[in-house]
């Protein structure tokens, strides 16, 4: 696929005789090629492909069931028995996904083998243009060998219009420079903390910062240059040298994540228009934090190329230094947030406005005294937030114990019980509760949630009142402490799914993102905070199209089209017994689920093909961050 084109995963369609066509989203290309394994239905009549510009279908192979089962036996033998069991019981979907997950999906720690099967030499298609690129390489004398490797990779670039300044750190006393280059595009200088980015850029069109030992792949600068036009910055993926060789597969532009983790790394180019907004602000120490934090605040249009274009060296932990730089930067840009480090993890603390806005907690419920008693106790007695309103939308409870419990709740002026005497419709119940709510901030909460810590609501409200934020979701754990919700990936499992479900609760996630608040495409309504005005602006939940399922994801995506981003935060952690009150859909309920799933797919097909916060090379088959 063409790395200069916007990412959009290919889609394959199996046209079946019974009319139940099947669509599958294929992986994107992080190296030279990608591959996919699927199950052909017995009544297959046609195969169709949809793909973007530059797509080349290199090879098609047909394999028998026995061949794939033998491969499964060799790679993950424990999955052979459940695969055969589901085939015998006629569950083609589970049979397919078990085998695909075993044979066509690799964990991130097996990247080296995955890479060997997919890496292709650069096509040398001349992707670049005449963009003049200025590169700065701060280095110590002791790093001259690493500098030499970086210089060699630059000289081999397809893009020829670049210049490099090796900025030696003046207070270093490790000895003389030991590099040999005669390229007129390369100059030596001394690093100057007081120099502005504009001065470093000089007459060039784009500025990039490199580290000693960075090895840009031959097509790197050409590919970056091809996507910079009209943007403030462009960045691509990288791999980190070592044992094991580690990929850094980055999401599309995520400023919250970038500010605390600096995930964009290298290779990155900053456009002249962005540098001009920095004014005379000094570039600061050679760690580069001043430059990337300034870009995080000032950038308006940032492009991510989901292609590995650089091999970098491992770097020491820089959390403390980044926290200091972030604490200096935030007041400069007028942000109320502050940098905090807990347990070695840097994250932003957003304050709750004073006085605290009223938070209306809306809980749809029916019977189940054990659930409603637990969640109301958590909200009313175990939550350290000063302005709470609790709205219970009751869907025709008949249990006398529950009705008696409601009477005791009514004695609390913070509580209201709203009857909803109609067939179960989660979206309609949510909207009904919101109509009765009086708070500035709405918090949608399932009745099977348990409060684990008193500060959960403050963390949600502090994020929800940010002008650029729409929905805010919490970290939800199953009763056994494993992850239930760490953000929704659109496309996962075919439509939408919870990332890293059933993994240990302390799972850090790729790039450490599950340790910090960050952008996601959607969050679950099991615990979702949003300002009332934003909820109303998009018309609330779609109770006609998505009565039961996909309503929360659809809601978040509609907020996204209105320019409001979704945030997931581990600073609010609760327990969730998922769907304990409803069970799994069967019969008519299953058919209703499929109708809603089809409607979701039709409405959001492009995001299913490219969730901006989930790398195109990561699998949609498994619920982990695996390579496909």
Image: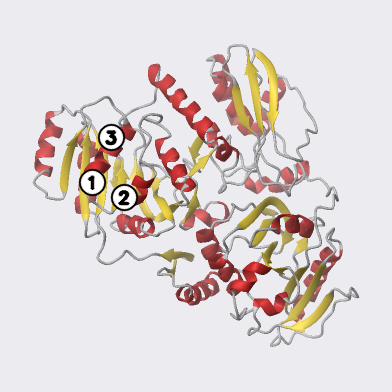
| Sequence-first tag of 3 and 2 | 3
Q: Residue at x 22, y 60 (%)?
A: 386
Number of marks in the rendered image: 3
**Classed neighbour count for the residue bearing mark 1: other residues with Cα under 10 Å, few (<14), some (14–19), many (≥20):** many
Q: Residue at x 57, y 71 (%)?
A: 294
Residue 446 position in % (x across, y down)? 30, 40
Q: CA distance from mark 1 to mark 3?
A: 12 Å
Q: Indicate left or right for 39 with 331 as reference.
A: right
Which residue is label 1 attached to?
437
The residue tagged with tag 2: helix, strand or loop? helix
Residue 363, position in %: x, y? 26, 41
> Dot 2 corresponds to which residue?
532
The tag earlier along the polypeptide, 1 or 3, is 3
Q: Nearer the viewer, residue 30 or 592?
A: 592
Q: Which residue is mark 3?
A: 429
Residue 181 got which mark? Answer: none
Q: CA distance from mark 2 to mark 1?
A: 9 Å
């Amino acid at each position: 696929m063409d790395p200069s084109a916007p990412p959009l995963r290919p889609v394959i369609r199996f046209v079946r005789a019974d009319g139940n066509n099947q669509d599958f989203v294929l992986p994107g290309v992080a190296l030279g090629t990608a591959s996919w394994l699927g199950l052909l239905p017995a009544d297959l009549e046609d195969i169709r492909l949809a793909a973007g510009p530059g797509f080349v279908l290199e090879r098609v192979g047909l394999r028998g069931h026995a061949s794939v089962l033998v491969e499964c036996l060799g790679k993950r033998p424990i999955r052979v028995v459940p695969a055969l069991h589901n085939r015998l019981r006629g569950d083609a979907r589970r049979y397919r996904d078990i085998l695909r997950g075993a044979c066509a999906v690799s964990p991130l720690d097996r990247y080296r083998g995955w890479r060997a099967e997919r890496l292709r030499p650069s096509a040398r298609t001349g992707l670049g243009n005449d963009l003049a690129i200025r590169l700065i390489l701060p280095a110590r004398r002791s790093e001259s060998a690493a500098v030499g490797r970086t210089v060699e990779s630059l000289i081999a670039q397809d893009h020829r219009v670049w210049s490099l300044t090796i900025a030696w750190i003046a207070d270093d006393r490790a000895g003389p420079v030991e590099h040999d280059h005669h390229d007129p595009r390369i100059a030596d200088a001394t690093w100057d903390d007081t120099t502005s980015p504009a001065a470093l850029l000089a007459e060039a069109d784009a500025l990039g910062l490199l580290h000693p030992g960075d090895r840009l792949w031959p097509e790197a600068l050409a590919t970056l240059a091809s996507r910079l036009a009209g943007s403030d910055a462009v960045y691509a993926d990288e791999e980190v040298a070592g044992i094991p060789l580690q990929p850094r597969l980055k999401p599309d532009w995520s400023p919250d994540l970038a500010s605390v983790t600096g995930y964009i790394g290298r290779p990155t180019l900053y456009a002249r228009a962005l540098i001009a907004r920095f004014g005379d602000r000094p570039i600061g120490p050679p760690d580069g934090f001043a430059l990337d934090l300034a870009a995080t605040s000032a950038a308006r249009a940032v492009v991510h190329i989901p292609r590995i274009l650089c091999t970098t060296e491992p770097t020491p932990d820089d959390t403390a230094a980044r926290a200091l730089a972030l604490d200096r930067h935030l007041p400069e840009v007028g942000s109320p947030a502050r940098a905090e480090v807990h347990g070695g993890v840097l994250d932003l603390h957003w304050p709750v406005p004073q006085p605290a806005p009223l938070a209306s907690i809306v809980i749809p419920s029916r019977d189940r005294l054990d659930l409603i008693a637990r969640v109301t106790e958590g909200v009313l007695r175990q939550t350290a937030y000063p302005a709470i309103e609790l709205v219970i939308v009751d869907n025709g409870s008949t249990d006398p114990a529950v009705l008696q419990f409601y009477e005791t709740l009514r004695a609390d002026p913070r509580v209201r019980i709203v009857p909803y005497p109609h067939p179960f419709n989660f979206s309609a119940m949510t909207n009904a509760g919101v109509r009765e709510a009086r708070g500035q901030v709405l918090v949608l909460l399932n009745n099977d949630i348990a409060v684990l810590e008193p500060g959960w609501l403050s963390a949600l409200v502090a994020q929800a009142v940010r002008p650029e934020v729409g929905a805010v979701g919490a970290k939800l754990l199953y009763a056994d402490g494993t992850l239930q919700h760490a953000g929704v990936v659109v496309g996962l499992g075919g439509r939408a799914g919870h990332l890293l479900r059933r993994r240990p609760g302390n799972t850090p996630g790729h790039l450490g993102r599950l340790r910090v608040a960050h952008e996601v495409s959607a969050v679950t309504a099991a615990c979702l905070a949003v300002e009332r005005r934003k909820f109303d602006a998009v018309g609330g939940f779609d109770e006609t199209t998505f009565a039961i399922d996909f309503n929360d994801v659809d809601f978040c995506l509609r907020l996204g089209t209105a320019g409001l981003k979704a945030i997931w935060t581990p600073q609010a952690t609760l327990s969730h017994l998922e769907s304990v009150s409803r069970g799994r859909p069967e019969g008519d309920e299953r058919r209703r689920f499929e109708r809603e799933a089809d409607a979701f797919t039709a409405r959001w097909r492009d995001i299913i093909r490219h969730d901006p916060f989930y790398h195109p090379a990561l699998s949609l088959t498994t619920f982990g961050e695996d390579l496909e």
